[in-house]
Amino acid sequence: MGDQGFSYTLDEALSAIGFGKFQFIVLAYSGLGWVAEAMEMMLLSFVGPAIQPEWGLSSSQESLISTVAFAGMLIGAYSWGVVSDSYGRKKGFLGSAIITSGAGFLSAFAPNYISLLILRFFVGIGLGCGHVFTSWFLEFVPIPNRGAWMVVFSTFWTVGTIMEAALAWWIMPNYGWRLLLGLSAVPSLLALVFYPLVPESPRYLSTQGRLTEARYILTKGAQLNKKELPEGLLVSDHVNKIETDDELSESSLLLSSIRNKTSDSQRRSSSVFMLFSPKLIRTTVLLWFLYFGNTFSYYGIILLTSQLSIGQSECEQPTLLAENIQDSSLYVNVFITSLAELPGLGIAALILDRVGRKISMEIMTVAGFILLLPLVLHQNAILTTIFLFGARMFISANFIVVCIYAPEVYPTSLRATGVGIATAIGRIGGMVCPLIAVGMSSNCHQTLPVILFEVTILLSGLCVVLLPFETKGRELVDVIDLPVQNVQVD
């Protein structure tokens, strides 16, 4: 606990206060952010088909509604990551909530197609902050069972998808797409309302040398959890040696913790280049493909579910598609397939802290690959549903583990930026997958798109094998220049 009890690190403080009411408040707010993103993303499955006949849109115009949202998320993911690493996690939350809720509500009143595209693009920019909620929550969680708590956090995404499917099932047949757009923006508005109540990340404050503010937040957390902080002064985790003089002041510790730092402007401009430092370049490139592959596969399977379900009986009668869109069975099918993520979360929670992040990802990837493989050939409706259900279960679970692993592997000074860029790369996969899942399978040619998804999943599994770091049980680090012996290498 530091030298002779005169100091303690942030991880020691978090271990001392444990997981209690303080972390549950953080969990609730970060979970609200993920519910908001999940609902707005699931919304894309319903709005396009409803607007197409009303406004006389072509298929390409309909697909563009989803594409502009992913394009906005691509820009937002990087931008909010830089903002959060430079100015604080809360600054990112504030900007995101304002843009998402504002553009989301205005979308419900869009007078024409062009205005809707512009507004959904801005909604996408706001949603790009979703990964910052992951990093923020992670920075409050003690090391023991961190993986299990991150899986609990990830359940909010599944809750959001199920809520949106249920809401669409109720709203769309009776009240239309505009009310659904308005109600789907409510979680983002709530995130804005509750924004003043949430704390800044003490780990971020610590890396900025703002140790007094970090200690104040930890003290409040200890009071809420009915625990005590360790004796002494809080120091940044990367301070290797401190003096033991009883007269040592916090200001001298602060100076020692920031002595080798560059200015804020230099750090912001060089953060991207630091991702390509010798210790991180391999991880960075592999994570980029993992995010691309998982986003491509996850949303692709969601789109394949509707395409193959409709296509089983309509390959020779395509005109029935419009009728099926109005039929409540479409919403029932989407609702049921959304439930596939729940058992996936359970499996991830059981094995994540037992076997480690990498092995968990390998298990999920192999299982998803095997379950999707039979769909290279046409199957009957029941088998198609079973295989798609199973594939989504494991691919969504794999995506969750990747989203837990990435913030753990990056240091605090680069965490939001590194995960933000990886998320942005993933959004490119989201922009491409409709062309494959919808465009190539719409005429009952499912073999080629399924093969493309399988190849992507296989390459993602190879990337997992090549990842150099296992983060199970490892402390979160603050700076890039860590001693080599503190990192577990496979």
Image: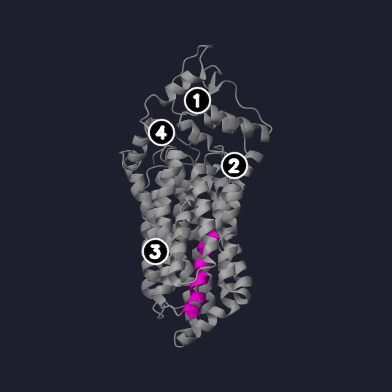
4 vs 2, front mark: 2
Amino acid type of disc 4? Val
Q: Residues within 10 Å of mark 3 (few under 14, many from 20)?
A: many
Give the residue displayed 56% in from the left and 64% down from the top: 340
Mark 3–mark 1 distance (CA, rounded to whole Å): 44 Å
Q: Are the residues at dot 3 and dot 2 in contact (C-beta closer than 8 Å)?
A: no
| Percent coordinates x, y for residue 9 in the rendering | 52, 27
Residue 240 in view in this figure = no
Q: Name the residue carrying label 2.
A: 198
Residue 130, how many percent across, how many down? Answer: 49, 52
Quote the CA–CA distance across marks 3 and 2: 33 Å
Q: Which residue is mark 1?
A: 235
Q: Earlier in the sequence, mark 3 or mark 1?
A: 1
Image: magenta residue range:
37-55
Instruction: From the image, tell me which residue sits under label 4.
Output: 479
Query: Is 305 located above or below residue 141 in the figure?
Result: below
Q: On the image, numbered disc 3 is attached to which residue?
A: 431
User: Which is more N-terminal, label 2 or label 4?
Assistant: 2
The answer to whether residue 169 is above or below residue 75 is below
- Indicate whether 88 appears above or below 452: above
Q: State the colouring used for the structure image.
A: one colour
Q: Secondary structure at mark 1?
A: loop
Residue at x-position 38% and y-position 47%? 467
